[in-house]
Amino acid sequence: MMRVMTMVGASIFTNYIKEKHGDIDAHFKQIENSLNWQWDDQLERIKPLKDVLSSWVKKNNTASAEIKSILKIQKEVHDNILVQLVATDTILSRLAAEIIRDELQGKIINNCQISVIFDPENDVIKNLQIRKRKLFEKEGVSRLARYLDAQDFGNGDLFNITGGYKALIPYLSMLGMLKNIPLYYIFEDTDELIKIPQMPVDINWGLFEKYVDIFEKLDEGLEEDWAQFKRRNNLEPEFPDCIWEDEGLVGLNSVWDILWHRFKEHILVKVPKESNQFSSEPPGKLKEVIEATRELYQRLDNEIKNNFLKSQEGLLKHIESLGTEHDLRHGENPQKNIFIFKSTDKAQIRIVYQPEFIKNYLSIKIYEYLRGSFDHTRYISKFRRKYKIQRAAGTIEFITIPIKKC
């Protein structure tokens, strides 16, 4: 079943008022700028609004931008859909989401059913409001990004960005591109459903790895003048304009906060550019290799934490000390500081790797990997000959492949 992640705004109220229905004006004006935390205090106004609007939407398929676009998408895909509503941190957005949920839940159109998810405890994004711009950017957008990033999107799922704050469209567009999720939008005054084309987004993962300690400090927030901090840390001109400043506080702006948290959720795996095995694997086989790589990363990470390792040199010495029967050092080393990892999975994958542990950040160089049983001695000899030729020719160039940690 296709999931349609849908942002919810307040168009259901403004559309009702535009039709010259003045019966909700008093209640609407009193809660127009109220935030979600004030919900219980405003129940006497919320209930009559909900009753009136719920009755009105039953007779009006264009009552709101969200309803109109959801019905249009359902007609376009002609299949059952699961709508997940996402509200801003306002009473009006939450109330609109509840009305839309109750109206569309279980609705059947052309033999296709609409199911709706909206739980105010989980689907109202705290601080996603426009009364305080800095709070919107620093907290609201970041929380929305993490909320969306935590969703298990599948093939065919999409973002419906017709409703909600228009200021969110650039952020949602970027998130859609990062997660390869198509975005749909419908103009309120027309029936045209617009699909925003996907464009490849190439994140400079190496920039995060190089400045991982700086990004960690910015993520926590600095109480220091930014110009002085840059001078003290010798930040090069390549360091991006990624910060916000507010009365002596410095932190990551909303766009870079999204990218930074995406970086932290991935393992950076470096593979030889000319012989990138990952790129030629069929999906089923690739999944096995990715799982083995995750296992390798987790095993290394555990060794680092359990043995209080603090440097690349310390990690390499520690792996060397494990002996040739250990999974992290399976047999004789192919080269100095290059090891073979024996995965515990059924595919019997062996990974020829070198860990890189710099500034407390762990990444992995994978020279190649093998499946099944093999002659270890012959393989080591062959690898050493090939490695020697490549090093002499200077032809070992690595590219970075991000793999989600889980």
Image: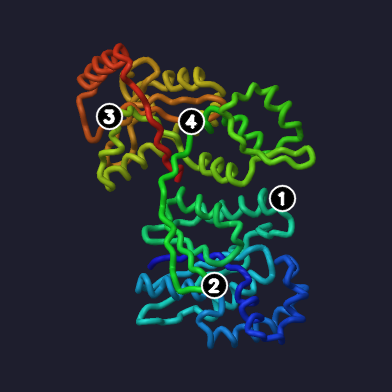
Q: Which residue position holds label 4?
A: 206
Element at badge 2? helix
Q: Amino acid at mark 4?
A: Gly
Marks 4 & 1, CB-CB < 8 Å contact: no
Element at badge 1? helix
- Residue shown at 65%/38% (left/top)? 243
How crowded pointer 1 is (Cα within 10 Å; few <14, some 14-19, many 20+) is rated as some
Q: Amino acid at mark 3?
A: Ser
- Residue shown at 59%/78% (left/top)? 99
Q: Which residue position holds label 2?
A: 65
How crowded pointer 2 is (Cα within 10 Å; few <14, some 14-19, many 20+) is rated as many
Residue 326 visible in this rendered orientation of the protein: no
Closer to the eye: label 4 or 2? 2
Above or below 166: residue 198: above
Closer to the eye: label 3 or 2? 2
Q: Which residue position holds label 3?
A: 275
Report how far apart the C-alphas of labels 1 and 2 lie in the structure: 27 Å
Q: For residue 134, which numbered disc appears in the image? A: 1
Q: Where residue 29 sits: x, y (%)?
A: 76, 75
